[in-house]
Image: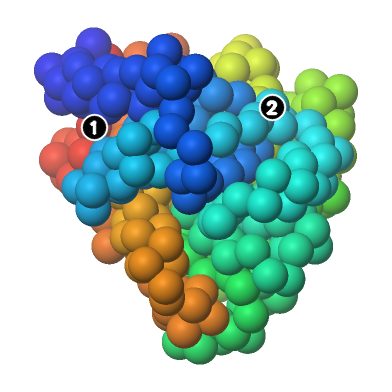
Amino acid sequence: MSIRLMKRREFIAGLSSAAAWPLVARAQRPAKLPIVGFLGSLTQSAQKEWTAALVQRLREHDWVEDRTVAIEYRWAEGHSERLAEIAAEFVGLTVNVIVTAGTAAVIAAKRATSVIPIVFGTAGDPVASGLVASLARPGGNVTGLSNESADIAGKRLLHQVIPGLRRLGIMANIGDPIGVLEMGKVQEAARTLGFEAVAAEIRLAADIAPAIDMLNGRVDALYVVTEPLVNTNRIRLNTLALDARLPTMHGQGAYAYAGGLMSYGANIPDLFRRAGDYVDKILRGAKPGDLPVEQPTKFDLIINLATAKAIGITIPPTLLALADEVIE
């Protein structure tokens, strides 16, 4: 394991403890605190780094959990049907702000309320998905941070790692509108570079193994569109891809830690740290529709050398030098 990764995990552990300590004190929470509802699309463990970054930033704004602000956490655990239920629960609790993780989560929250402010810590394309009227003037009760996942799709095509790449597989959950949008962006970028794009459409976890089987021997690499279904099944997906000796590219670091070859995308904890700034402003009276949607400023390239060795791929030294983290 690399020194860089070890240091990062130590840092994450420290952040996570900051998010976890209020659970003990919750029974002694003062009455009438403003309430922030955190709507997570995945599991608590999968998004603990994100919530820790949010909590830390709120503390820097003097919003201390269970002292000056209450935070209610709910987790859909990859089940999209739970998102609407949780959003309705937050409306019933009359929370002051809803913070969402993932495009599907903010869509569910927006359908549940047009009054309670909603801050998305990450969303694929807020304008195309109808979350906001524009980035500069969101309007309504929704604002937050875009992860630009679809916009940077062309930078994830693996051609720098696999010089002979000619056929690219693209796995996406076609039940997710942002996933469909990103798939289209990848197909467009592949055509521009002269690659053949082979779509592997899934809707359920049970579709992943047949999709890998279909791609096995037909493509040189696999681009995986990031969304809750594949995130929940990322270890199994990467195990199947490894068995097929299929190099994978992902949009979040968690996939590389789970055995994927590479990931490149916005630094999600940094986005949730910045989401704390939105929450602070809203709790102090700002209207979400007046707060422009912001773009990522930090992007991470993570390379899993152990996976590269297992499938017989040599990562160019120039690319390794650019990596933010190398897993060995």
In-image side of 113 versus 65 (left or right): right
Q: Position of residue 37 (x, y in %)?
A: 57, 44
The correct choice, above or below, for 42 with respect to 91 in the image is: above
| Tag nearer the camera, 2 or 1 | 2
Q: Report if residue 300 is visible in the image.
A: no
Residue behind mark 2: 77
Tell me the quadrant of the picture where the C terminus can be found: top left
Label 2 Cα neighbours within 10 Å, binned few <14 / some 14-19 / many ≥20: some
Nearest the viewer among 16 and 151 is 16
How far apart are the two marked residues, 2 and 1, measured between alpha carbons?
A: 27 Å
Q: Can you tell which mark lies on residue 291?
A: none
Q: Report if residue 18 is visible in the image.
A: yes
Q: Position of residue 174 (x, y in %)?
A: 82, 51
Nearest the viewer among 34 and 48 is 34
The colour scheme used here is rainbow
Q: Which residue is rendered at x = 45% and y = 28% of the image? A: 29
Query: What's under tag 1, amino acid-wise?
Result: Glu
Nearest the viewer among 176 and 140 is 140
Tell me the quadrant of the picture where the N terminus can be found: top left
In-image side of 104 versus 148 (left or right): right
Residue behind mark 1: 325
**Helix, strand or loop at mark 1:** strand
Q: Position of residue 98 (x, y in %)?
A: 58, 53
Query: What's under tag 2, amino acid-wise?
Result: Glu
The correct choice, above or below, for 327 with respect to 201 in the image is: above
Q: Which residue is rendered at x = 48% and y = 65% of the image? A: 144
